[in-house]
Image (cartoon, helix red, strand yellow):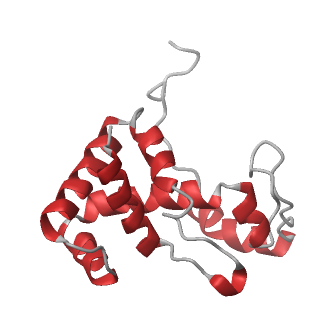
Amino acid sequence: MLTQTEMAILNNILDQLIPANKKRDLPSAGKLEIAAFIVQRASKNPVLKKDIASIVLYAQSKADKVSPNFVRQLQDNKPSEFESLLIETYKGYYSRPDIREKLGLSAHAVHPQGYDVKKESEELLDALTEPVRQRGPIFLDPTGGKKDGA
């Protein structure tokens, strides 16, 4: 889908989206070559493929060097494409077991084993569902008020 030069541009953009953090020993998204993850996802998603191609073409036409300022321009000028890229970048980066471990999370994926989640208290559940109970049932009667399908 992308040439080597285009992959390098995409990885440079990803370096700006998730920069390295030396204190926490976290590499940037570009250094982890998250672009390959995104390209693989785009091969199965025509909208994402179009968005990534649009971003790379924009980068080739506007920037000699990818910088934080360029990424802000990208976000302003191509907001939907930028959002697609950002979401896939996060998915690719934070789905890696090595990154999750460095962040103090479990190395296994969220599914199928999942993470421990504390059960909500009965008081919290009551507070969250009170507006729904007060509203009462709201639905469309599929029988139109007829009994026994008559």
Q: Residue furthest front?
A: 4
Instruction: Tell me the residue at 32%/79% (across/down).
Output: 67
Of 146 and 78, which appears nearest the observer? 78
Measuring from the top left, give residue 55's x and y in whole percent.
Answer: 25, 57
- Please tell me whether residue 112 is drawn above or below residue 81 in the rendered image: above
In-image side of 90 versus 124 (left or right): left
Residue 47 found in image quarter: top left
In-image side of 123 versus 18 (left or right): right
Instruction: Tell me the residue at 25%/77% (across/down).
Output: 70
Residue 73 found in image quarter: bottom left
Counting labels gives: 0
Residue 118 found in image quarter: bottom right
In-image side of 131 versus 9 (left or right): right
Measuring from the top left, give residue 90's x and y in whole percent.
Answer: 53, 61
- Please tell me whether residue 106 is drawn above or below residue 22 in the rendered image: above
- Please tell me whether residue 52 is drawn above or below residue 47 in the rendered image: below
Of 71 and 111, which appears nearest the observer? 71
Measuring from the top left, give residue 54's x and y in whole percent.
Answer: 21, 52
Q: Residue furthest top?
A: 150
Measuring from the top left, give residue 142's x and y in whole percent.
Answer: 48, 28
In the picture, the quarter occupied by the N terminus is top left
Instruction: Tell me the residue at 56%/54% (across/down).
Output: 92
Q: Residue furthest left?
A: 61
In-image side of 10 versus 149 (left or right): left
- Please tell me whether residue 47 is drawn above or below residue 89 in the rendered image: above
